Image (cartoon, rainbow, N blue to C red):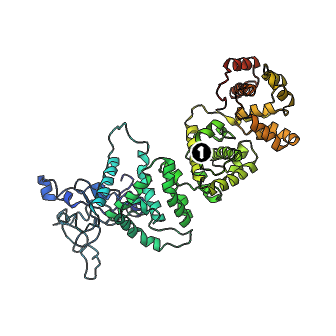
Amino acid sequence: MLTIRAGTHRARGPATVGWNMTPSSRYCPPCLRGNGSPIQNTLGGAWQLRWHLPIVFACTRHKSLLEYECPSCLLPLNNPERRRVALIKQPNIDGLHPLQCRNPEISPGGNPIPGTGPVCGARLDHIDSHRNSPFTLEDLQLLLDLQKRIDGRLNPPVNSAHASPAADTYFHDLITATRLIKISWPTGHRLLPTSTLAAIVNAHIAPFLSSYSQDQGATIAGVRTAPTDPATSGALLLAADNLITERDVWTLAEKVGPLSAETYRRSKPYASKIAQEPGISKEFARAMSPRDPNSRKTNILYRKLRHNYTFTIAQVPAYLPRSWYLTHFAKLRAQLPNITYRDDRLLRRGAAFRLAELASGQTWSDCAMSLGVSPGVGANAQRMLGHRLTDARLWPLFTHIVEEIADELDAQKDRIDYANRRLRMGSWCMPDTDRDRLFDSLHRLERLRTQMVPRFMSIVVWSDVTRGEPSRSPFAVAVRSAVGTQALTTLIGHFHEANLGHGQRFRLRQRLALYATYLARSCDQDEKLSVDMDVVVAQEADAYSPRAPDPLA
C-alpha cells in the first residue's frame, strides 16, 4: 500500500494492474456491525485499509468472503472521486451513516446519476454474508485456509528466526503466477481442486481470451488486472498458490512448464516479459525459463535469466569433472536410452558450456571460445545434445541438473581460476626426466614407457590440471595428425579415466594425479611450473594399497 500515493492518477490503472490495491473497497458486513462498544454501536465497525488489497478476499474471523458491491445499487463501493481514494466515498455528505452506500442513485434507465445528487443510501451492515454463495463448504474452507496463510505473510512475527528464504518473494511469485495462469488458461485448470472454483476462474478469464487475436505479437489485455470480485480473486490466488508452493526447482519446473510453454505459444513478447518480472524468486524464474535447446529466441531469454551468479566464466571448467558428472547425472543417464561413452562425453561437454552460459550470458559458441575451445565445438555440442535430449524429453532435466551444479559452484568460497590454469599450461610440456621418474619401480610398464604416443603423459596431466577434455589439449592437437584422432581417443579412454584395477598401471595413474595436483598448485600460486619427483614417487609409494581409492573420484 505504501507504493500507492492516494490522490494521484496512480490510484487507478497502475495500482489495480500491479495488484497493489483496489480503489473500490471490499467489506465484511459482520465486521461493519461493530464489536459492541459504544462508539461502534453508534458509528459501526471500522473500514479496514486492508480491504483495499486484492489479495484480501475473505474474513477469517467471520468465515466468509468479503463483499464488494452494494446490495441495492449493485455498484462497487468507494470508487475514487476526482481521482482520489478514501476509505469512505464523499465523506462530507451530511445525514448519512458511515455504513450507508454513497454511490449515486440509479436513474430509471439503469445508469448512475452523475454529480452531487441523491445517493443510494442502502445500509451495508445488514447483508447476509452467506447469501447466494456458489461455494460448497469445502470450497469455502480452501479459500479461508489460503487467506489465513496470506494474512500470516502480511503480518509476519517480529524478528522471526524461522522466516523462509522465499518469504520476500512470495507475493511477487503469487501475482506473477496469476498472470501465467490467466494467459495460458485452461492449461492450469487442474491447479484448482474443485470444478466450482475452476468454473469461477474460467468465467473471469474467458472474455479476454475470446477476444484475443491469434497474432502472437498482439497484447493480451486484462492479464495483469486484479479481479474485483473477491470470489474470483480467491479462486485465482488459490490456483497461483498451488502452482508456486513447491520450491524444489525441478518439481516446480514440471508444474510451471506446460503453462509457460502455452504462454510462449500465445504471446512471445509477453512470455519474455513475464519471466523477467522484478522481484520474483530465482526458482520461479528458472521454472518459467524456455527449455528448447534449438530455439534461438528462447535461448536468448534463458541467457537473460542467469540469476546473478557470483562465479565467472573463468571459474568454469572446460569439461565437466568426472566426480561432478557421477554425482549429478546418474538420474539422467538412467533415463537416456542406449547411452554410450559418446553420450557421456557430450553431456560433460554440454554441461560445461551451459555453466559458462549461466555465468556469462553468452552463446555456446562464444562460451567455447572463452573456455579455450573452438566455437564450432560449442555450436555442434548444442545441436547434437539438443536433439539427443529433446527426443528423449530430457532437456529440462539436463538444465535442472546444470543449475544444481551452478548453485554448488556459486556457494564455494575458494573457486579455481581455470582460465589462469589454461593460460599457464598452454606451453607447458612434461620434462623427459619427470616422465622417466614416473616409471620408477614399475618394471612391468617398460613396454608402455617406450612405445607410448609422444607427449601422452603431458596430455593426461594437462587435462587433470585444467579440467579440460584431453583430446582438446594443445599436445593432442599436435600429435593427432600423426597417430589419428580415433587412435588418440582410444588411448586416452583406456588410460585417462578408466578403471585400471590395482596393478602397476593404477600406480602410474596415481603418480600422474599427484603430479597434476602439485602442478595445479603452482599455477594457482603463480609459481614456477616444476614438480619435485622425489616427493611424488615417495608419496605414492607410502599411500599405495591394492585397494586404494580412485584418485579421480
Residue that label 1 marks: 402
Position of residue 263 relative to residue 473, above or below, is below
Q: Name the side, left or right, on which 437 lies relative to 190.
A: right
| Residue 142 location (% of width, % of height) | 32, 56
Residue 434 shows up from this direction: no
Viewer-nearest residue: 220 or 318: 318
Q: Residues within 10 Å of mark 1 (few under 14, many from 20)?
A: many
Q: Secondary structure at mark 1?
A: helix
Residue 389 shows up from this direction: yes
| Residue 138 location (% of width, % of height) | 29, 59
Viewer-nearest residue: 485 or 211: 485
Viewer-nearest residue: 198 or 356: 198
| Residue 85 location (% of width, % of height) | 32, 61
Q: Amino acid at mark 1?
A: Val
Q: Residue at x 68, y 50 (%)?
A: 364
Q: Indicate the quadrant where residue 391 lies.
A: bottom right
Q: Residue at x 51, y 49 (%)?
A: 250
Q: Indicate the quadrant where residue 422 lies.
A: top right
Q: Name the side, left or right, on which 486 lies relative to 262.
A: right
| Residue 372 location (% of width, % of height) | 74, 42
Q: Indicate the quadrant where residue 73 lies.
A: bottom left
Position of residue 523 relative to residue 124, above or below, is above
Q: Name the side, left or right, on which 349 lies relative to 454.
A: left
Residue farthest toward the left in the current orientation of the protein: 38
Which quadrant, please, contains the C terminus? top right
Residue farthest toward the bottom in the current orientation of the protein: 109
